[in-house]
Image (cartoon, helix red, strand yellow):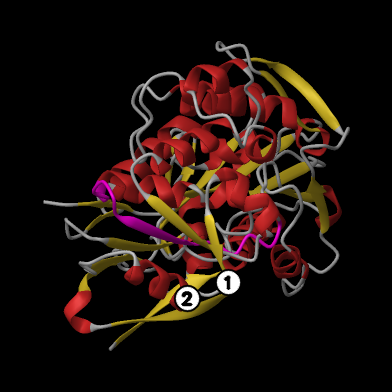
Amino acid sequence: MVEIWLPYGKTDVHISIQLRNLLGTAEPDKGDPIINPVEEIGRSLLEPIESETLKELTKPGSKVAVAVDGTMTPHLVASGVYSIVHALRRSEVSLGDVCVIVGNGLRGRSDPQVINAISSLEGFQSLRVVEHSPTGSDVTEAGATSAGTKVRVSSAYSEADLRIAIGDVRPDYSSGFKGAQSTVLPALSDHVSIERSRRLAFNGTIEPGSIEGNPVYTDELEAAKLARTDLAVNLVTNGQGDLLKAYSGELEASMRESTSMIADSYKVQAEENADIIVVSAGGGRFDFDLYNSIWALRSVTPIAKRGATIILLSECTEGLGAEGLETLAKVDTISELRRRYMLGARAVYLIKSTLRRNQVILVSALPKYLAEPLGFTVVRTANDAIEQAMENHRRKKTQVVTHGCSTVPYVL
């Protein structure tokens, strides 16, 4: 038997597969992680791309907002905030004039570990931390994008004199790539803005790892500019969330350098003709709810042959994550999903289109009454799922994908 450990929530779970049945394990390229993230981010602040330095942007008495995406890893958030606040202090900005905003636009509520990571920063315990909720009323309208999205962002961000957005750069199944622009929309935005922007993903072909012609990416970028983001801090990470490189500067220019640096490193080779595909969403920064983790299913459908069983590991302690996953659970045509669009409609379409070709077994803490209307078979342990899948297949060749939301598997 081969024992394989897969991320699940804040821990790992193991699966046991007979060696003769294991086709392979597709894991992200770890690259060369930065040993000292604070030092690397500090370097990027001194060498901004097509932008003034932080010291040049700062005026005496400036009120500064530092925004982070609440779905980032706590360690990465802490490193980014510490580097920026430390640089601001060197520019004689008072700690009392700095506000850190945790954007929870696609999460709904803050991860306590993220808040604790910021609050525990040595010497910065008095730092003001604001948690943004997409359903809260404390937002300011900043204008409308060319696609018609009314940009409503956190007032704490909008009303600051200097606005800095920290983003985690990695493949995304709506915008192509996440980055600092995603920290403004969706992370700092209200529900209406998010829903309108994500609707654009139904227009054209959306490919993770490609921003060229992506309407959601364009919308997010325009929103970040309308919100008057003064400095973007883009943190390039590998599939496991480790920092590889930091690029600070103008929104578009720093993002261009970031995506160029990633190249195709997020792609992972998988074996073809698997009868069973086991895929983990990638652990706690993805599988806190179904909406944010379901894109792991999208990562493996291109390599899944008709009739194969897909086992998706997604803890989902925060539930479905989008109203549409419950309200539209019985809808299975794209025309009807577009007509009745709400956040989660595109995820429903992904689920329904996958189920036409494959069985999906969901390993999750999600209650069955929420998951089964979508067409999933729900079990509580990964090994129970594998045992059930094995019973349904004469051939039992199995492919494992360890980080489905941050990698793109392919077959030669």
Judge whether residue 229 is colored magenta: no
Secondary structure of the residue carrying numbered label 1:
loop
Which quadrant of the figure contains the N terminus? bottom left
Query: Which residue is the site of mark 1?
Result: 380
**Residue 240 rendering spot, x and y as whole percentages:** 43, 65
Q: Amino acid at mark 2?
A: Asp
Pointers 1 and 2 in contact (CB under 8 A)? yes
Other residues around mark 2 within 10 Å, as few (<14) / some (14–19) / many (≥20): few
Query: Which residue is the site of mark 2?
Result: 384
Q: Nearer the viewer, residue 174 or 360?
A: 360
347 lies above or below 366: above
Q: Majority secondary structure of the magenta segment? A: loop
The residue depicted at 73 percent of the width and 38 percent of the height is 59
Is residue 236 shown to the viewer in this render?
A: yes
**Residue 380 rendering spot, x and y as whole percentages:** 58, 71
**Residue 153 rendering spot, x and y as whole percentages:** 74, 31
Q: Nearer the viewer, residue 279 or 97?
A: 279
**Residue 239 rendering spot, x and y as whole percentages:** 39, 60
Q: Residue furthest bottom?
A: 1
Q: Amino acid at mark 1?
A: Arg
24 lies above or below 162: below
21 lies above or below 155: below
The residue depicted at 20 percent of the width and 67 percent of the height is 395
53 on left or right of 209: right
